[in-house]
Image (spheres, rainbow, N blue to C red):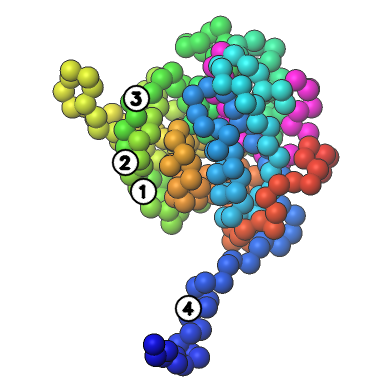
Amino acid sequence: MTRLALPALALAPLLAVARPAEPAAGPPVRALLVIGGCCHDYKTQQKLLTEGVSARANVSWAVAYDPDTGTKHLNPVYESDDWAKGFDVIVHDECTDGVTDLKVIDRILKPHRAGLPAVLLHCGMHCYRSEGFPKATPWFEFTGLASTGHGPQAPIAVTFTDAESPITKGLKGWKTGNEELYNNSAGKLLETAQPLAKGKQTYTPEKGKERTDEAVVAWTNTYNGKTKVFATTLGHNNETVGDGRYLDLVARGLLWSVGKLDAARLKPAERVMLDAPGKSR
């Protein structure tokens, strides 16, 4: 077999493409992922999220994974009053709508009311439904959108509606695999929230005619007048959670929430997991 000798200059661009991105300099954003509960493959998704985001942004993680698959089990991380101490941002990816004790909900929200940024993913919107649900629950003020249910498993066409937002600028919409389109029960976001993307889902109900539903699927919220929250209802199946386009959106939303969405931080973290999670900064 004859090997062709390519000029050195011809090889240079190929090597540049193959070389991995340089890690970001400086301390990483310290993120806590709270994950677990009903109806999702959280055991796999915790790895997809942490590794996927850290490959795109200077973020290192501690993970509070609860293997309980019910809706009423409180993640043990919340048993402490200072559960959020030492973190720059909390990523809520739990599915526990059966946790309704207002004292517990208040404990979870306390650091966020004080200004701790947050990211809310998928079923994180459907958690902590207090006795006032569905008309009222403190959790909806935090999420910025009242959502009480979702459609079937079917692809969702995602369109970014705020192309100038620093979170979505440069990103392009896509069509997911099978996903759940969450409803907007009040018909719109709260006044404290701003939409970033909408999703359109077409399907045929059993013994019914084809229908198309549309709803906001990504937005930002200002909680308690000061706390920055990024939220997306996407992220049910592993195919979506592991999709580079989804991870781009979540990584940028996370950096935005802590006020560090810039080129210096949009580089891989040197390490995914924190050495001493929860310690004071």
- Mark 2 or mark 3, earlier in chain: 3
Query: Is disc 1 in contact with disc 4, using a CB cutoff of under 8 Å?
Result: no
- Mark 2 or mark 4, earlier in chain: 4
Question: 10 Å neighbourhood of mark 3: few (<14), some, or many (≥20)?
Answer: some
Q: Nearer the viewer, residue 156 or 168?
A: 156
Gap between marks 3 and 1 measured at Cα: 20 Å
Query: Is disc 1 in contact with disc 2, using a CB cutoff of under 8 Å?
Result: yes
151 horizontally vs 164: left or right? left
Is 19 within the magenta?
A: no
Gap between marks 1 and 2 measured at Cα: 8 Å
Please state the extent of the stretch shown in magenta in the rendering. 78-98
Q: Disc 4 residue type?
A: Leu
Give the residue pinned by disc 1. 173
Give the residue pinned by disc 3. 151
Q: Nearer the viewer, residue 76 or 132?
A: 76
Number of the label disc, if any, that sits on residue 14: 4
The residue most toward the top is 131
Query: Is disc 2 in contact with disc 3, using a CB cutoff of under 8 Å?
Result: no
Gap between marks 2 and 4 measured at Cα: 34 Å
- Mark 4 or mark 3, earlier in chain: 4
Q: Secondary structure at mark 1?
A: loop
Q: Residue at x 53, y 76 (%)?
A: 16
Q: Disc 2 residue type?
A: Ala
Is 88 within the magenta?
A: yes
The residue most toward the front is 1
Number of the label disc, if any, that sits on residue 157: 2
Residue 193: percent from left, percent from top:
49, 32
Is label 1 or label 4 in front?
Answer: 4
Is label 3 or label 1 in front?
Answer: 3
Residue 81: percent from left, percent from top:
78, 22
